[in-house]
Each structure stands twice: as structure tokens, then as C-alpha cells.
Amino acid sequence: MGKQGHWNRGGDAETKPLLDESVLALKYGTRASDETVGRNQRSDLLKGVKLGDENSARLASSIKMAAHTDTVGEAILQNLTTQRDTITRARVSAETMEEDMDISERKMTRMACEQCLQRWVLFVIAGCVLAGIIVYAYYKLEIEPARRGDEPAGTETGAEASLGRFAPRRLLRL
């Protein structure tokens, strides 16, 4: 450094004053003293430090909020993953249940067809049994007594004549 209050630019002969009086005059007025300028600069410096501290506090709060938001976001994503897995398992279970219901429906339809077939077989068997009973009764009431000769031929009562040959003779005698 050269003289007090001036700084040297690497040995040049040209020097520049530390405090440019024209800039200070514009900022603080022409009647500003070193003490006034110092106070004003000190207050500006304190305001700048205070503003920096406030900004640092806001930045720390923002970082804390971002970390909290990240934690909450991760928890929400984990929750959504769990819900997706639950829904996937439920969907698979529903599909399995639907397949089982289709199988059960086919079995029930087959059982209904078998029941219908069994009913028809029962009706046919019942009809055969009834026809057998009718044939047996006819045989016992008409054919067997005629073979034994219990009735003389040509002796018909009035009821037998009106009903014809299909009426059981024993029933008409009563």
C-alpha cells in the first residue's frame, strides 16, 4: 500500500482513494461527516446481518419442512404400495372365487339335469309298476276265473252287459 487512505494496484503510479467522496455525498448528503457515515454504514451492516440471519432461519425452516415433507411422502408411498398389494391379492381372490363359482354353477346345472332325468326314470318305473299292477289285477279278476271255469259262459248280468267286456266281473257282482 502506498499512502494511508489509498491503495495501490500492483505498483501503478495511479492510486484510488478508499472513500470516494462523490459517492458518499450522493448517498449521505454533502454535509455528512465520517462519524455519520460510519453510523449509517454500521446500521446498514447490522440490517444486512439481521436480514441474513432471518434468511438463514427461513432456509433452515424450509429445509426442515422439506425433510418432513419427504418423510410424509415416503410414508404415503409405502401406504399406497401396501394398499396396491392388498387390492391385487383381493383381485386374485375374487378371480379364484369367480372360477370356483363357475365350476359350482356347472355342477349345479349338471345335478339339475340329472334330477330331471331321475324324475323321468321314476315316472317311467312308476308307470311300469302301475301297468304291472293293472295287468296283474286284470289277470286275477278276469282271466284266471275264466280259466278255472268259475262262471258259466254267457251268464252276464245287466251291469256287465252295459259296461262291456272291459269291466271286471267280480267287481260287478258285488
Image: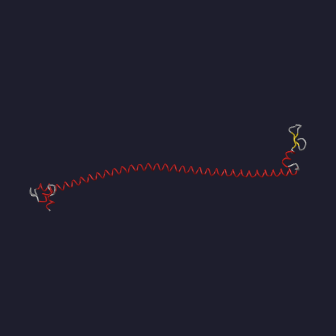
Q: Horizontal placement of 1 versus 110: left or right? A: right
Please tell me which residue lies in front, 161 or 148: 161
How many marks can you see?
0
Location of residue 169 (image quadrant): bottom left
Please tell me which residue lies in front, 22 or 139: 22
Q: Which residue is farthest top? A: 12
Give residue 155's position: percent from left, percent from top: 9, 58
Give residue 148's position: percent from left, percent from top: 11, 56
Q: Which residue is farthest bottom? A: 174
Figure colour scheme = secondary structure
The quarter of the picture where the N terminus appears is top right
Give residue 103's position: percent from left, percent from top: 41, 49
The quarter of the picture where the C terminus appears is bottom left
Q: Horizontal placement of 113 versus 87: left or right? A: left
Q: Horizontal placement of 116 versus 147: left or right? A: right
Please tell me which residue lies in front, 54 or 140: 54
Q: Is residue 129 above or below residue 174?
A: above
Give residue 71's position: percent from left, percent from top: 63, 51
